[in-house]
Image (spheres, rainbow, N blue to C red):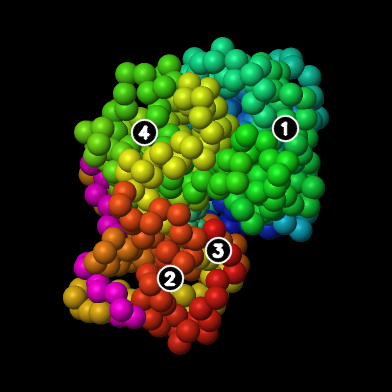
């Protein structure tokens, strides 16, 4: 086996502090680009000697080519063993599980999550560490520095590995074990949930539609829901992963999963609708005639988790990202457990989970998960819902309505302003920051500001501080607006405005969301001078 050193140039565009790279696919296909990031990662983790790695992706265009490159570079960097999902397929949560199960050093996950796939769409790669979660900032900083400084990468010149057969082969001294992508993951799910109860639910005539959006959860959902749990054939739709996701946008929200939403709002609706994203970490839950916001879903799951075997002993605590609604705070308070508010992004949950401070975490962007892996997990959320539905023998709508009657309702919506000129987006944020301390007590558009600050997070586990995590403005009467810039956009800047309004148990719990949020929205637009700063107030996406 001959190891070649190939010259490469520094790469642009990895954001410091992010655990991976997300770019147009053609950028990744340029000679040396992917290779630079992979070599930088090997350099940052101190080489590949004596290390086991997990490799897989969401099946999008370039997935298999990227895996071949990674395997050849892993062999050149001295890696001992690589475990790869068959056909290159591994959902993000399944990859996280395999890292933990095999005590691996980490894993490369190929995905641009919910972004479209194809030669003219997006591709991505990220490195997860030993705990199965996104690499911590200390490591991503090292990778980032290395991407700017490396001049060559190591690769071996061998034939491609057969990814289709479940066998172990060798590149030099490195073994490449191809595994069924679903098997270990399903075994883990069986330890968490009452499969017999869920099977009974389906036997009793319960119906469901799971939209895999032509992305990675197709094989997982088909094997688990239709295969093991006895859901009717055809329960999983769009279940074959396609390189371009059927030209769709594999993001499980009411906009991109519109066909499912339309079905769930129609007379033909099954009892439960669910969807997951490109790499299987996000989820959407819809009952017959009722969409469950991700913030509400987190709260309902936390309040009912004890009904599933893995959580029967109770939860250690709940964590939610700062822009996620306060619905789960109310559950934590009632349960008498800790509630942690973290910056946006799953990596902040990792320390809390590792330290045993929390059991369940979630984000308003449709990510929910628990301490079973170190990533959010779309199918896990769906199975926990099914377990709860099986035990409570009520509809989604009854469970959500009952939740609001117990805790009150947090009306919630997110507005996204996409592809804004970066200078304008930055100017809006700095202008807000400059005025923030003077906002308290001011009345704008009929609402009084109770408090305003920029969120900064002191990690209670490792003491690290993450500043500038979004401007939050609380209003008297239970309203809140949050402004932050997206860290995952690929074009210009994306400004996110998160709106919420609490109505207590005695309030009107049946209003239309945007009506309930009107005052908060008007005040937020006025305070930020949105029209003046970015030239518009109408968002591209409302979710
Ligand atoms: C978005 C979501 C965030 C999520 C991330 C990765 O990040 O808002 O909750 O963790 O995608 O899926 P953003 O673009 O807002 O930085
Ligand atoms: Zn994802």
Q: Residues within 10 Å of mark 2 (few under 14, many from 20)?
A: some
- Cα distance, mark 4 to mark 3? 27 Å
Q: Which residue is mark 2?
A: 518
Q: Residue at x 46, y 75 (%)?
A: 425
Q: Is mark 4 within 8 Å of ligand 1?
A: no
Residue 236: give its label: 1
Q: Please indicate whether residue 449 sits to the left or right of residue 488 in the image.
A: left
Secondary element at tag 1? strand
Residue 251 image point, x, y percent: 63, 49
Quadrant assignment, res 88: top right
- Cα distance, mark 2 to mark 3? 14 Å
Please state which of the two labelled residues, at mark 4 or mark 3, is closer to the viewer.
4
Q: Which residue is mark 3?
A: 542
Q: Residue at x 48, y 46 (%)?
A: 294
**Quick one: label 4 or label 1, which is nearer the N terminus?**
1
Q: Is residue 200 visible?
A: yes
Type of secondary structure dominating the magenta stretch: strand
Residue 480: within the magenta?
Answer: no
**Quick one: label 2 or label 3, which is nearer the N terminus?**
2
Q: Residues within 10 Å of mark 3 (few under 14, many from 20)?
A: some
The image shows residue 8, relative to residue 104, as above or below, that is: below
Q: Please indicate whether residue 240 sits to the left or right of residue 151 in the image.
A: right
Q: Is residue 34 visible?
A: no
Find out whether the residues at labels 2 and 3 contact each other: C-beta distance under 8 Å.
Answer: no
- Cα distance, mark 2 to mark 1? 37 Å
- Cα distance, mark 4 to mark 1? 27 Å
Q: Which residues are magenta?
A: 444-460
């Amino acid at each position: 086996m001959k190891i070649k050193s190939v010259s490469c140039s520094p790469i642009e565009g990895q954001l410091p502090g992010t655990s991976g790279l997300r770019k147009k696919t053609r950028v990744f296909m340029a000679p040396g680009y992917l290779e630079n990031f992979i070599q930088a990662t090997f350099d940052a983790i101190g080489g590949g000697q004596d290390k086991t790695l997990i490799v897989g992706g969401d099946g999008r265009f370039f997935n298999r080519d990227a895996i071949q490159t990674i395997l050849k570079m892993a062999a050149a960097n001295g890696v001992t063993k690589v475990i790869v999902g068959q056909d290159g397929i591994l959902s993000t949560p399944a990859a996280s599980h395999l890292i933990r199960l095999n005590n691996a050093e980490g894993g490369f996950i190929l995905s641009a999550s919910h972004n479209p796939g194809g030669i003219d769409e997006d591709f991505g790669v990220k490195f997860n560490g030993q705990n199965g979660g996104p690499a911590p900032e200390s490591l991503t900083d090292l990778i980032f520095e290395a991407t700017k400084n490396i001049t060559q990468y190591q690769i071996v010149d061998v034939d491609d590995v057969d990814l289709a057969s479940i066998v172990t082969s060798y590149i030099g001294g490195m073994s490449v074990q191809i595994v069924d992508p679903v098997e270990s993951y399903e075994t883990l799910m069986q330890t968490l949930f009452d499969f017999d109860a869920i099977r009974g639910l389906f036997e009793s005539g319960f119906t469901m539609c799971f939209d895999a959006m032509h992305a990675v959860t197709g094989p997982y959902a088909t094997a688990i829901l239709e295969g093991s749990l006895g859901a009717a054939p055809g329960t999983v739709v769009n279940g074959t992963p396609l390189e371009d996701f059927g030209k769709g946008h594999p993001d499980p929200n009411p906009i991109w999963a519109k066909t499912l939403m339309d079905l769930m709002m129609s007379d033909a609706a099954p009892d439960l609708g669910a969807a997951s994203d490109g790499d299987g970490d996000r989820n959407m839950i819809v009952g017959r005639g009722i969409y469950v916001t991700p913030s509400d879903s987190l709260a309902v799951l936390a309040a009912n988790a004890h009904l599933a075997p893995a959580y029967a002993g109770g939860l250690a605590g709940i964590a939610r990202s700062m822009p996620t609604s306060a619905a789960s705070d109310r559950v934590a308070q009632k349960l008498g457990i800790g509630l942690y508010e973290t910056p946006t992004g799953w990596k902040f949950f990792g320390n809390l989970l590792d330290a045993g401070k929390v059991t369940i975490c979630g984000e308003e962007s449709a990510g929910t998960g628990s301490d079973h892996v170190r990533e959010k997990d779309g199918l896990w959320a769906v199975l926990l819902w099914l377990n709860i539905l099986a035990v409570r023998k009520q509809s989604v709508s009854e469970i959500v309505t009952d939740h609001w009657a117990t805790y009150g309702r947090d009306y919630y919506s997110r507005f996204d302003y996409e592809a804004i000129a970066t200078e304008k987006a930055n100017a809006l944020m700095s202008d807000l920051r400059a005025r923030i301390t003077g906002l308290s007590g001011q009345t704008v558009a009929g609402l009084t500001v109770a408090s305003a600050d920029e969120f900064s997070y002191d990690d209670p586990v490792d003491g690290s501080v993450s500043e500038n995590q979004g401007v939050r403005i609380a209003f008297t009467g239970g309203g809140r607006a949050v402004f932050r810039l997206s860290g995952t956009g690929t074009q210009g800047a994306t400004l996110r405005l998160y709106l919420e309004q609490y109505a207590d148990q005695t309030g009107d719990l049946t209003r239309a969301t945007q009506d309930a949020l009107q005052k908060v929205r008007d005040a937020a637009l006025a305070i930020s001078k949105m029209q003046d700063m970015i030239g518009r107030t109408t968002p591209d996406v409302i979710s």
